[in-house]
Image (cartoon, helix red, strand yellow):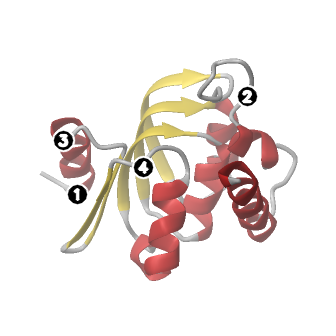
Amino acid sequence: MNSLQKAKELLSSENATLVAFNGDEIYISHARGISPILDKIDENPSFWNGACVADKVIGKAAAMLFSKYRVKEIHALLVSEKALRYLENTAVSITYDSVVPHIINRDKTDMCPMEKCVLYTTDEDEAEKLIRNKRQELMK
């Protein structure tokens, strides 16, 4: 069983939101939204380089972070068309169960604020700043 298959299996069996393998290191999160990605970036940004990730939801914001930090491959239970379009031009390989036009917010009333904040950028450094600023704003 390869790392991506193990990550997919753990995503389900651990009822996690994100599972990532990089060599012998494993990262499992139950946190929602973009936080699991940003938290690991803050703790150990090099962990993502070459990692295999299974995630419940991948929008464009997550896709841009995964590309910037050089994730090797992703499996998403749900992915947005915007994330797929973005990843087409990167070295990140992605498989998925379902595709939606965009990720919706938790209230199901609008687009996810993280996907919305990176909608019009293709610059990964700018995207990370926008994502971090939006997360700060939402935490207030």
Q: CA distance from mark 1 to mark 2?
A: 32 Å
- Kindly identify which residue carries mark 4: 74
- Kindly identify which residue carries mark 1: 3
Q: Do residues under tags 2 and 3 come within 8 Å of each other at their CB atoms?
A: no
Looking at marks 1 and 2 on the same chain, the residue that comes earlier in the sequence is marked by: 1
Q: CA distance from mark 1 to mark 3?
A: 10 Å
Q: Percent position (x, y) of residue 124? A: 73, 65
Q: Do residues under tags 1 and 4 come within 8 Å of each other at their CB atoms?
A: no
Kind of residue sitting beneath label 4: Ile
Q: Do residues under tags 4 and 2 come within 8 Å of each other at their CB atoms?
A: no
Q: Is residue 6 above or below residue 124?
A: above
Kind of residue sitting beneath label 2: Met
- Kindly identify which residue carries mark 2: 111
The label number, if any, that marks residue 9 in the structure image: 3
Q: Residue at x 66, y 53 (%)?
A: 139
Q: Nearer the viewer, residue 79 or 87?
A: 79
SS under mark 4: strand
Q: CA distance from mark 4 to mark 2?
A: 22 Å
Of discs 4 and 2, which sits in the foreground?
A: 2
Q: Percent position (x, y) of residue 56? A: 41, 37
Task: Report which quarter residue 108 is drawn in.
Answer: top right
SS under mark 2: loop
Kind of residue sitting beneath label 1: Ser
Task: Report which quarter residue 82 is drawn in.
Answer: top right
Q: CA distance from mark 3 to mark 4?
A: 13 Å
Of discs 3 and 4, which sits in the foreground?
A: 3
Q: Is residue 65 left or right of residue 26?
A: right
Q: Do residues under tags 1 and 3 come within 8 Å of each other at their CB atoms?
A: no
Of discs 1 and 3, which sits in the foreground?
A: 3
The label number, if any, that marks residue 136 in the structure image: none
Q: Residue at x 52, y 76 (%)?
A: 42
SS under mark 1: helix
